[in-house]
Amino acid sequence: MKKLLLASTFFAATLSIQTATAEVSPLVAQGEQIFHQNCATCHGRHGEKKAFGRSAVINTLDEATIIQALKDRKAGLIQGAGNPVKARLNEEQMKAVAAYLQTQR
């Protein structure tokens, strides 16, 4: 009985990990790649840090707020060290980064 319980627990955990991995949308995957290449150095691997001790902890923000902040930085309305990176992002990439950060809460 103990072996059966252990085996079923292992199977359920494995299935859960596979399901969680399989459910990552292409938008979130794209956002993860963009974030890790361009943003994680200052904002932390999961968006959990204040960049240079001044920004918001971005993994706590909703998608609309993240997208608007990226647009404002791209437009030069907000000045900061990350502006050159943000200036290169198109709207789809901004949405992807915002979608990814929703998974990092």
Image (cartoon, rainbow, N blue to C red):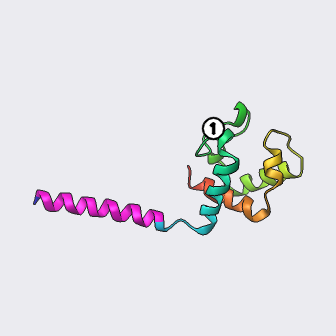
- Direction front: furthest residue: 37
> Disc count in the image?
1
Asked whether residue 57 appears in the rendered view, the answer is no
Query: From this viewpoint, which residue is outermost toward the top?
Result: 53
| Location of mark 1 (residue) | 49
Q: Residue type at mark 1: give it.
A: Lys
- The picture places residue 5, in percent across and down from the top left corner, at 17, 60
Q: Is residue 9 left or right of residue 24?
A: left
Which x, y percent locates residue 3? 13, 59
Question: Is residue 31 among what the camera can see?
Answer: yes
Q: Secondary structure at mark 1?
A: loop
Residue at the (63%, 50%) spot, across then down: 36
Name the residue at 50% across, 67% down. Answer: 23
x 85%, y 52%: residue: 74
Q: Is residue 51 left or right of residue 44?
A: right
Crowd rating for badge 1 (residues with CA inside 10 Å; few <14, some 14–19, many 20+) = some
Residue drawn at the location 79% of the way across and 51% of the way down: 86
Q: Residue furthest right?
A: 76
Majority SS type along the magenta span: helix
Q: Which region is colored magenta? A: 2-21
Q: Position of residue 29 (x, y in %)?
A: 59, 62
Name the quadrant of the N terminus: bottom left
Q: Is residue 8 magenta?
A: yes
Displayed quadrant of residue 4: bottom left
Q: Residue 66 location in percent, x, y?
A: 72, 52
Q: Is residue 90 magenta?
A: no
Q: Nearer the viewer, residue 71 or 7?
A: 7
